[in-house]
Image: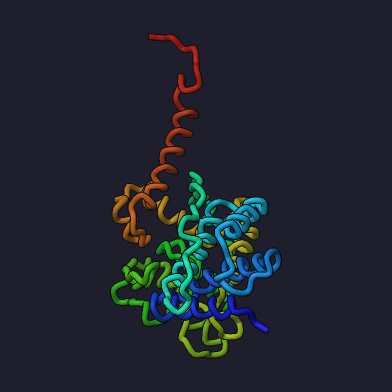
Amino acid sequence: MDSFLTFQMNDFKMYLEVNKHLSKHSVESYMSDLEKYKEFLAKKYEVNDIKDINTDMIKKYIQSLKRGGFESSSISRKISAIKSFHKYIASDPDYAINDVAQNIKKPKKEEKLPIVLTLEEIDMMFNTIKTNEPLDLRNRCMLEFLYGSGLRISELLDLTTSNIHLHTKELNIIGKGNKERIVPLSDMSIDAFNKWMSNGKPKFPTKPGNYIFVNKSGDQLTRQGVWKLIKEIAREAGITKEISPHTLRHSFASHLLNNGFNLRYVQFLLGHKDISTTQIYTHIQTDKLRETYLSCHPRAKGGSNNEV
């Protein structure tokens, strides 16, 4: 029998879907984090109602995440889900409880530069896909969209034909916070899209939703499915970096800046609310500049050439 806490979580899920208008993937992420939270509370404290949770229990859960080796970014995301859940329930007069998570602090954000592929590594990934089999046509199209337009994985998976505007070579994307933006489609992306839609996707069963990227059953691809595909393509290409679909987005931004693209434009294309989020890519350029300087300048490493 489901606990009352499960009912409260389902109530929160409906709030995210109906009131907050979050994407299916965002809702799934929230609920997955809360499910792990619920499992911890049930196992350690036999909690089955949110009113039985106190601040110390939440802190103990966070400590367990740290001991489990979770990165601070992952812990912050889980804390956000917990705080949002408690705040929502506490705001409902029918429950009449205090928000015991309001003073929980997120860990300090780690200054960790994203992994970026070189242009050669990008080419290696594309060159791995050599046939015109339906799955290869789909995978090439996915790579072109992720790298060519800098899409988030959730944005890629939610694409339907209504998002594609071939005559203007654009995509209209609904990103985080339900914000819409327009991003360009490269000629190579359009070519890959046309081949996939003409010679690939029709070979798979037709299902409701009209999603562009589907599996062999015709159903919408999952985040886990795309992660697995990208890692497999990278492995076959001989790339040893630990990459994900988001690595292609990072590479998109970094390569634009390397070629003199305006930071504000990159911010818009990525759909970043705050330019400070985009500025992490300027740190990558600075690191590359320092590396080049150290390898090229005769006195960069304490050389003793005193000629005048």
**Residue 279 coordinates in the image, percent (x, y):** 37, 47
Q: Residue at x 36, y 49 (%)?
A: 276
User: Which of the 4 quarters of the picture holds residue 232?
Assistant: bottom right
Judge whether 211 appears above or below 73 on screen. below
Residue displayed at 39% across by 75% down: 20
Could you say which is closer to the camera, residue 46 or residue 147? 46
In-front residue for pair 282/121:
282
Q: Residue at x 43, y 76 (%)?
A: 92
Q: Quick one: which residue is furthest to the right in this view?
A: 43
Instruction: Say which residue appears at 65% left-offset and 60% top-offset.
Output: 236
**Which quadrant of the figure has residue 286?**
top left
Between 290 and 112, the one lying in front of the other is 112
| Residue 1 appears left or right of 308 | right
x and y percent of residue 181 in the render? 32, 68
103 or 63, which is in the foreground? 103
Q: Position of residue 272 (x, y in %)?
A: 36, 59
Q: Residue 216, relative to residue 278: is it above or below? A: below
